[in-house]
Image (cartoon, rainbow, N blue to C red):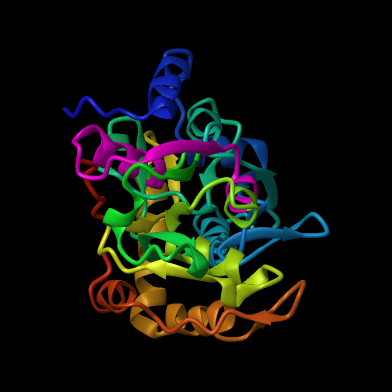
Amino acid sequence: MKNTILTSIVLAFTLGATQVNAESTLDRIKASGKITIGYRENADPISYSIDGKPVGYAIDVCHNVADEIKKTLQMPNLNVEYKVEHPMTRIPDLITGNIDLECGTTTHIIQRDEIVDFSTAYFVTDVGVAVKKKSHINKLDDLIGRPVVLTKGTTSEKYMMSLKRTDVLNFKNLYGADNKESFDSLSSDRVVGWAMDENTLVTFIAKSQNPTDYKILDGGLSKEPYSIMMAKNSPKLKAIADQVITHMWNSGEMGKLYQKWFQSPIKPSNINLNVPPSASFKALEKQPTDKGIDLP
């Protein structure tokens, strides 16, 4: 077992001691007459909100999963509710039953497997570092000794800090409470770089006032598979999610979702991110998997 256990995992494990494991998540959904889905409110185009309504690539995927749960439980009128989640609360809320599924931008890392389950991945992105072109930073080594912001509680933060601990990349780390705060640090020149998954970086850059001011360093950093996260007490629920997502990959529906959210105008600003599918995305499309990544 690695020593780099995430803070959120430790917290979730502690809370897990109070969890009643007698009933599965599916049992709880059936008894309550509702399914509660956690989502991110500002991780567009994957998971975000417009006027309080959750939308995005992951929301579309989880809508299909919720429909299949209704069929499995023979409850066509099952209510679907949504709850905003944050990196530091998502795992505890799953374990304590405050949410049933988490449909955001959560990376499946194997260190989390002891306390939560993950579906087959519905998306994959790479970790990158956004910088301003005027900084003349052209490669990762140019970040040595320079301030780089990390969004607290994210997998990208843990990955970058592991590089720092092992002296692979000795930068000065600063933290943003969320992605907006991290990008604000970069745009205001308080830092020279923001390390995050490239999907998030591309989205924030496209929405900025001067998108051409930025670039993303090509460093070949870690891949991040996004999966639906759920408590470790309902293998039937995982099987439903796996079946739905695998079918979406094999039928071409996931590719259509990519075109909808990454290559078409999206609300509320009608910005077209115009991002072609990455090699990692195409590989997952050919061979869907629920395998997680291992943090160094």
- The foreground one among 31 and 44 is 44
Q: Which part of the image, by quadrant, shows the C terminus?
A: top left
Q: Is residue 222 visible?
A: no
Q: Is residue 74 visible?
A: yes
3 drawn magenta: no
- The foreground one among 192 and 183 is 192
Identity of the residue furthest to the right in this view: 51
Residue placed at 51% from the left, 34% from the top?
94
Q: List x then y, in percent, for residue 137.
A: 39, 62
- The foreground one among 212 and 63 is 212
* Left or right of 59, for residue 16: left
166 drawn magenta: yes
Residue placed at 19% from the left, 35% from the top?
166
Q: List x then y, in percent, for residue 127.
A: 36, 58
Q: Which part of the image, by quadrant, shows the N terminus?
A: top left
Please report the bounds of the magenta region as a residue range: 156-183
Residue placed at 38% from the left, 34% from the top?
233
